Image (tube, rainbow, N blue to C red):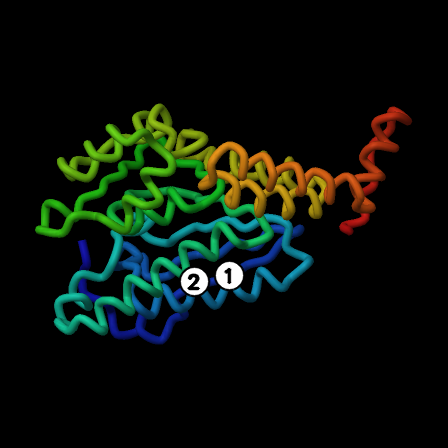
């Protein structure tokens, strides 16, 4: 799936950022090659996430891509050219670090999946907080077809779908369609391609109407507790709720509910 890169594309940034009304859209910009998650692409996404994490003007992030596909996964040509363990380990370490930045970001991240997402590209979808896919899109953990079990993509995907479904994807490497991905829990919405942006706008508008403090605190607590046992999860959740109630936005929310009015968030 990795086509040759035109010479003029080499000077283009790997990731484009566009901000509008509190929404930052990050667009993978190697569409002519199905946006492979090369070492340079991983670094560019990571840098963009770091900048957004410090930007209080951003309420929601949309992760999109150019070209026919969302992402075909790691750059296999690049991997083939570096047959030393240290380089390979750094690639997967950097990928893991970038994927975890998505869950650690204060702002929710929505994957805008307009085309095929395979291997680490499927992993990228799974690590986003929400995902909306066009109805023609396919997904796969296809590494097994090339002698590579998708062990790292499995980390994210297996936290979205059941173990049996994840193992089916990992062992067979077959494509699943968008409706199957929806049924299995990999994506939240499936819509016709021409309705993709409108559906995402519904989600971003709804999120922006909520307290940014509550969203950030809740997201952080969600990912922290989800890996814990029951007692530890309740401890984390209880402390988060306590802190949330005592914020300015928490007090405003309670006052607005009691007063039967729309809350005016202060962002603290």
Q: Are marks 1 and 2 in contact (CB under 8 Å)?
A: yes
Any mark on residue 49, and which?
A: 1
Number of on-image labels:
2
Quarter of image, res 178: top left
The local secondary structure at tag 1 comes to helix
Question: Counting other residues with Cα less than 10 Å from the Cα at mark 1, is it few (<14), some (14-19), or many (20 or more)?
Answer: many
Quarter of image, res 241: top right
Measured as percent of width and height from the top left, residue 176 is found at 24, 32
Any mark on residue 152, and which?
A: none
Measured as percent of width and height from the top left, residue 183 is found at 35, 24
Closer to the camera, 248 or 11? 248
Measured as percent of width and height from the top left, residue 129 is found at 49, 42
- Residue at horizontal 38%, vertical 44%? 125
Closer to the camera, 143 or 4? 143
Q: Describe residue 114's horizontal placement relative to residue 49 as left or right.
A: left
Measured as percent of width and height from the top left, residue 158 is found at 32, 38
Extreme front residue here?
231
The local secondary structure at tag 2 comes to helix
- Residue at horizontal 50%, vertical 64%? 48
Extreme right residue here?
259
Closer to the camera, 58 or 267? 267
Any mark on residue 45, and which?
A: 2
CA distance for labels 1 and 2: 6 Å
With respect to residue 112, does 104 lie above or below? Answer: below
With respect to residue 59, does 180 lie above or below? Answer: above
Q: Describe residue 240's horizontal placement relative to residue 7 as left or right.
A: right
Q: Describe residue 140's horizontal placement relative to residue 207 as left or right.
A: left
Q: Describe residue 204's horizontal placement relative to residue 2 as left or right.
A: right
- Residue at horizontal 27%, vertical 51%? 152
Question: Counting other residues with Cα less than 10 Å from the Cα at mark 2, is it few (<14), some (14-19), or many (20 or more)?
Answer: many
């Amino acid at each position: 799936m990795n086509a040759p890169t035109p010479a003029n594309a080499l000077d283009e940034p790997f990731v484009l950022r566009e901000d509008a009304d509190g929404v930052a859209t990050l667009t993978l910009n190697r569409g002519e090659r199905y946006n492979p998650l090369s070492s340079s692409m991983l670094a560019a996404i990571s840098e963009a996430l770091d900048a957004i994490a410090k930007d209080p003007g951003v309420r929601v992030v949309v992760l999109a891509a150019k070209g026919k596909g969302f992402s075909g996964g790691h750059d296999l040509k690049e991997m083939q050219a570096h047959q030393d363990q240290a380089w390979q380990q750094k690639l997967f370490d950097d990928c893991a670090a970038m994927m975890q930045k998505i869950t650690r970001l204060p702002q929710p991240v929505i994957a805008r999946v307009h085309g095929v997402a395979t291997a680490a590209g499927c992993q990228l979808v799974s690590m986003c907080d929400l995902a909306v896919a066009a109805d023609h899109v396919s997904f796969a953990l296809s590494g097994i077809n090339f002698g590579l079990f998708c062990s790292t993509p499995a980390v994210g995907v297996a936290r979205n779908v059941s173990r049996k479904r994840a193992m089916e994807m990992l062992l067979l490497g077959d494509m699943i369609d968008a409706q199957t991905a929806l049924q299995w829990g990999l994506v939240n919405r499936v819509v016709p391609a021409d309705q993709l942006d409108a559906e995402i706008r519904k989600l971003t508008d709804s999120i922006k109407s909520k307290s940014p403090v509550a969203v950030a605190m809740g997201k952080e607590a969600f990912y922290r507790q989800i890996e814990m046992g029951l007692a530890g999860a309740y401890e984390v959740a209880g402390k988060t709720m306590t802190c949330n109630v005592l914020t300015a936005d928490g007090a405003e929310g309670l006052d607005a509910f009691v007063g039967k009015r729309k809350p005016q968030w202060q962002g603290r």
